[in-house]
């Protein structure tokens, strides 16, 4: 157990300090499974980004929107019963895990540590949307229409946000484009494709909006799904320091039963995030220098924390007894 | 009672008018109190048994009554739209028992099979005050009238047609003294692998996954205990397996649907002096299973329904009759999408007064209904039928109408809304009917104009902050229109020729702009053509009958794209030799490529031939 915790700590530390690629593997789900929000409240959180999720559970029905985390490999079954699947059948570079977006309006992705440059991410179609566009279904048309000549498209528009304002640039990515005069050029995205988002510069969130040429009275017929993986953020390695390597900062008491205190902070108030061993954000708040932080409500275990101070990001760990 | 009797006489007269030609051809036309009760002041179209077998029932409804049929293709779903209403706004009765699914609020008209009824009556206009929820735009009343046949009769029928159509049917009539029985078995199958064209320069496509098998078994009995007391009993077993074909923008479909129903209805009628009592007791148990192996969808649902109607009519003085009507309607249903088995209990009472003078008849009704713990507003109506001259009648009526939310509206998870109100509104109509007979010619013409508004129209939409659809009382629909119909009959020494036609102008617009579904204020409702009409001609001798009909459906807006106007013609020849009758039928005679619902192809020219043999 101790070995595995140490290994996990090393992984998480690397994720925060050196890895600026969010590959969703940290959620540690088994192959052909998914997280749709039924076990978390409100969001999927990594050290770098937050993916909102809304989940409704009744005794006989559950419903989600926003983001899910998936490792589904079935890329052949059509319909919404296979809604967690990427058409590639795996993550980017044949990894296991990826994220699936399902939102009729704009879906958001938040940067955890203030404004940061998101260099890009890999995007592909969901199996549900891909097969619907390729073959049609009872509600949506196959792209190209009955004759094959319809000028259909499935467009993902990405907006950047900074301090609540929309950056005056949008980045468009066609998940399907059948607008060519020569039908042989029509295409459906069926592999992970890198989208460069660095043009936004620093952002604190991204907005994703799907539009389609196939619309009826009840809105868009094309299933409003797409998938992302390997979100690349600006490299913060130079700004990230392990608290153990800091000459001034220290966490005590550690292990602790009810509170921790961080000494040596430069700023008067500091953003602190605490993660469990699954990499899920369990606590996020502002901590003042020299003030004790109540962790009595946390379950027993090892926790990773990040704290920003003096324009640097520090990582550390503590054990709750 | 006298008024009711007069009404029956009037209806019989109308039927006899229509019977002039058919009596030359057929030896048996049953008319046994076939008119829909309490429908005074409305235009009524009746289709008799021998006419019913000439077409698929939805097609016949469209041709004869002007009801717009939203057909999803041969053998597929077909729903009605009358006077710009939705399918749930036309009540369908089988032997005076509602047929609509309480889950969906509609009836798939393609499931109606002519072996299960021998009389169809279509009454246009609001009748909710008497017939309750759903009778907003009109009522389609189907009944099996079992007469006291003079002898035993056994009939066999076989038909084949294009696209693998096969039908085998037998009907056995049997009478003993005051008891009469009729039993029918009917099996119908089709592959429906027809070719259709998307565009002339493109190869034709073959429709797939469109086969069906239908079994219908019916039994009806009449027990005429005394001259004034009778019992009718009806049983209808139905089992239909249908494949759900792909749309024109769908490569493949493997979906299929199974419908299974057991329906029982018993009616006791007794009269004494100036009182008449009618008791209708019915039970139905129905299943609908939709499955799609491709998407792993398995969606079974079922319901059972007990229905009781007691009508007590009283004629205190000549020309005045009063009817009191009590109804109990108890439904239990289950579906995957319901949290648990759900039920709905409806109780209602109706008072109907009919006052008749030689020149005019005035009727008034009012209905009060309670659904579970909710009172439905009182539904009054008034109607006048005025004989201006022996040939000219004027009808006028005003009604308040309503439609209750369906069980899916109330209980579907997610989204079901238990706080829905009943759709309701007022309708008014004014009609004129002219009949004239001169020698061998007869003419009948009607013109009706109507106005109807419905508030709290239920639509499924997504509320702000929600992620799934829910039904809400968000729409308000204003429907108005003009209906014209006419029929000319000329009798020859050895035959009859009849020309008939109808035209409907229908404006049915939403009066509240909506974002989802996207409907502008004043926009015509989906799949509701403004113009629609039919022309038909029939020539009949004692052995030969020739029918030709043309139907025009104007353009209409669909969910995804507009549906173009279409003109489709059908023809049929029937030849009778002694106890044998043969027919050949051509549908879509001029091989038109058209749609009623976008992306749902309908076959080009196709044929049916058949033979019916009366064994004894």
Image (spheres, rainbow, N blue to C red):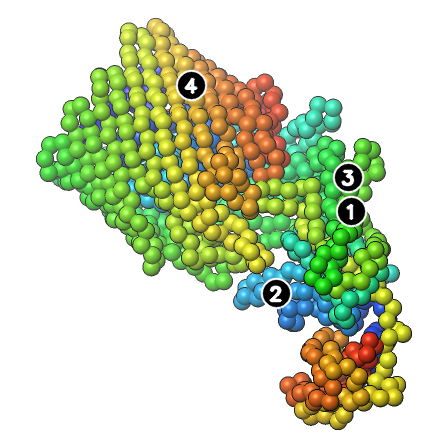
Residue B483: x and y in percent read 39, 25
Q: Identify the residue at image location x=47%, y=62%.
A: B340
| Residue wearing tag 4 | B501
Which residue is at the front of the view, A28 or B21?
A28
- Count of marks overlaid on the render: 4
Is there a contact, CB below 8 Å, between mark 2 and mark 4? no
Residue B601 at least partly seen: yes
Q: Quadrant of residue B317?
A: top left
Q: Chain letter for mark 2, please.
A: A
Which image quadrant is residue B351 in?
Answer: top left
Comparing labels 2 and 1, the label whose residue is closer to the camera: 1
x then y, percent, for residue A141 = 67, 41
Select label 1 or label 3 by which is in front: 1
* Residue B548, position as x, y percentages in the image: 48, 17
Mark whose residue sits in front, 2 or 4: 2
Instruction: Answer above or below: position of A89 versus A212.
Output: below
Q: Is residue A152 or residue B548 the one in the foreground?
A: A152
* Residue for badge 2: A55
Which mark, residue A316? none
Secondary structure of the residue carrying numbered label 3: loop
Are the two marked residues, 2 and 3, in contact with CB atoms closer than 8 angstroms?
no
> Chain letter of disc 1?
A
To which residue does mark 1 refer? A174
B612 lies above or below B262: above
Numbered disc 1: secondary structure: strand
- Badge 3 crowding class, 10 Å Cα cut-off, few under 14, some 14 to 19, many 20 or more, is many
Residue at the image position 72 percent from the left and 67 percent from the top: A50
Work out whether disc 1 and disc 3 sit on a shared chain.
Answer: yes
Q: Which residue is mark 3?
A: A178
């Amino acid at each position: 157990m101790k070995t595995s915790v140490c290994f996990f700590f090393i992984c998480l530390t690397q994720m925060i300090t050196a890895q600026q690629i969010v590959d969703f593997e940290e959620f540690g789900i088994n192959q052909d499974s998914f997280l749709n929000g039924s076990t978390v409240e409100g969001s999927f959180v990594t050290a770098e980004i937050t993916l909102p999720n809304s989940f409704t559970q009744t005794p006989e029905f559950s419903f989600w929107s926003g983001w899910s985390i998936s490792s589904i490999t079935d890329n052949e079954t059509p319909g919404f019963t296979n809604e967690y699947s990427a058409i590639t059948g795996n993550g980017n570079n044949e990894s296991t895990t990826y994220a699936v977006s399902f939102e009729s309006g704009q879906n958001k992705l938040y940067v955890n540590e203030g404004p940061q440059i998101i260099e890009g991410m890999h995007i592909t179609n969901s199996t549900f949307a891909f097969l619907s566009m390729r073959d049609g279904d009872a509600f949506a048309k196959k792209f190209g229409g009955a004759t094959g000549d319809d000028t259909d498209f499935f467009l993902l528009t990405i907006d950047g946000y900074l301090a609540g304002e929309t950056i005056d640039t949008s980045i468009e990515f066609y998940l399907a484009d059948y607008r060519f005069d020569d039908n042989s050029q029509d295409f459906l995205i069926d592999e992970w494709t890198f989208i460069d988002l660095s043009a936004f510069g620093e952002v604190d969130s991204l907005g994703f909006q799907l539009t389609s040429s196939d619309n009826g009275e009840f809105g868009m017929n094309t299933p409003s799904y797409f998938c992302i993986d390997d979100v690349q953020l600006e490299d913060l390695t130079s700004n990230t320091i392990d608290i153990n390597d800091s000459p001034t900062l220290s966490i005590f008491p550690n292990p602790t039963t009810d509170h921790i205190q961080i000494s040596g902070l430069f700023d008067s108030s500091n953003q602190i995030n605490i993660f469990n061993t699954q990499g899920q954000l369990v606590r996020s708040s502002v901590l003042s220098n020299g003030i004790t932080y109540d962790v009595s409500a946390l379950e027993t275990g090892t926790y990773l924390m990040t704290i920003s101070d003096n324009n640097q990001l520090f990582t550390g760990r503590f054990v709750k007894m | 009672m006298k008024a009711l009797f007069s009404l029956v006489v009037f209806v019989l007269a109308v039927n006899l008018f229509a019977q002039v030609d058919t009596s030359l051809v057929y030896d048996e036309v049953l008319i046994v109190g076939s008119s829909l009760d309490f429908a005074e002041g409305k235009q009524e179209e009746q289709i008799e048994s021998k006419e019913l077998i000439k077409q698929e029932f939805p097609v016949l409804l469209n041709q004869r009554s002007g009801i717009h049929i939203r057909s999803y293709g041969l053998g597929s779903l077909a729903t009605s739209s009358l006077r710009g209403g939705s399918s749930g706004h036309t009540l369908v009765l089988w032997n005076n028992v509602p047929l609509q699914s309480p889950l969906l609020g509609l009836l798939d008209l393609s499931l109606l099979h002519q072996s299960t009824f021998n009389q169809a009556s279509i009454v246009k206009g609001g009748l909710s005050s008497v017939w309750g929820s759903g009778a907003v735009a009109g009522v389609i009343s189907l009944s099996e009238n079992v007469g006291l046949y003079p002898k035993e009769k056994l009939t066999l029928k076989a038909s084949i047609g294009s696209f693998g159509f096969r039908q085998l049917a037998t009907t056995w009539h049997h009478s003993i003294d005051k008891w009469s029985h009729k039993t029918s078995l009917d099996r119908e199958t089709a592959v429906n692998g027809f070719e259709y064209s998307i565009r002339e320069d493109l190869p034709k496509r073959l429709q797939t996954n469109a086969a069906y098998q239908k079994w219908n078994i019916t039994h009806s009995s009449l027990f005429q205990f005394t001259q004034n007391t009778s019992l009718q009993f009806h049983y209808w077993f139905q089992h239909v397996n249908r494949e759900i074909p792909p749309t024109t923008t769908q490569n493949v479909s493997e979906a299929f649907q199974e419908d299974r129903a057991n329906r029982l209805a018993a009616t006791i009628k007794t009269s004494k002096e100036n009182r008449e009592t009618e008791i209708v007791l019915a039970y139905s148990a129905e299943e609908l299973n939709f499955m799609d192996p491709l998407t792993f969808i398995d969606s079974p649902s079922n319901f059972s329904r007990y229905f009781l109607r007691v009508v007590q009519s009283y004629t205190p003085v000549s020309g005045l009759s009063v009817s009191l009507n009590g109804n109990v309607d108890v439904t239990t249903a289950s579906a995957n999408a319901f949290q648990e088995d759900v039920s709905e209990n409806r109780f209602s009472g109706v008072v109907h007064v009919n006052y008749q003078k030689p020149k005019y008849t005035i009727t008034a009704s009012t209905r009060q209904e309670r659904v579970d713990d909710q009172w439905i507003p009182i539904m009054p109506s008034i109607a006048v039928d005025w004989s201006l001259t022996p040939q000219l009648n004027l009808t006028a009526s005003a009604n308040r109408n309503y439609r209750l939310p369906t069980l899916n509206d109330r209980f579907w998870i997610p989204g079901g809304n238990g706080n829905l109100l009943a759709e309701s509104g007022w309708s008014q109509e004014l009609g004129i009917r002219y009949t004239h007979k001169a020698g061998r010619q007869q003419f009948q013409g009607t013109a009706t104009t109507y106005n109807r508004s419905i508030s709290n129209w239920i639509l499924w939409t997504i509320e702000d902050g929600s992620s799934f659809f829910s039904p809400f009382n968000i729409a308000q629909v204003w429907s108005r229109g003009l209906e014209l119909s006419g029929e000319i009959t000329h009798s020859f020494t050895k035959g009859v020729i009849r020309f008939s036609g109808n035209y409907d102008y229908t404006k049915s617009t939403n009066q509240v702009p909506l974002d989802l579904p996207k409907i502008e204020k004043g926009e015509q409702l989906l799949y509701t053509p403004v113009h629609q009409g039919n022309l038909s001609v029939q020539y009949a001798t004692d052995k030969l009958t020739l029918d030709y009909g043309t139907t025009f459906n104007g353009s209409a807006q669909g969910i995804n794209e507009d549906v173009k106007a279409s003109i489709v013609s059908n023809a049929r020849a029937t030849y009778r030799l002694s106890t044998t009758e043969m027919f050949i039928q051509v549908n879509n005679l001029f091989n038109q490529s058209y749609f009623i619902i976008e992306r749902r192809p309908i076959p080009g020219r196709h044929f049916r031939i058949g033979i019916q043999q009366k064994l004894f």
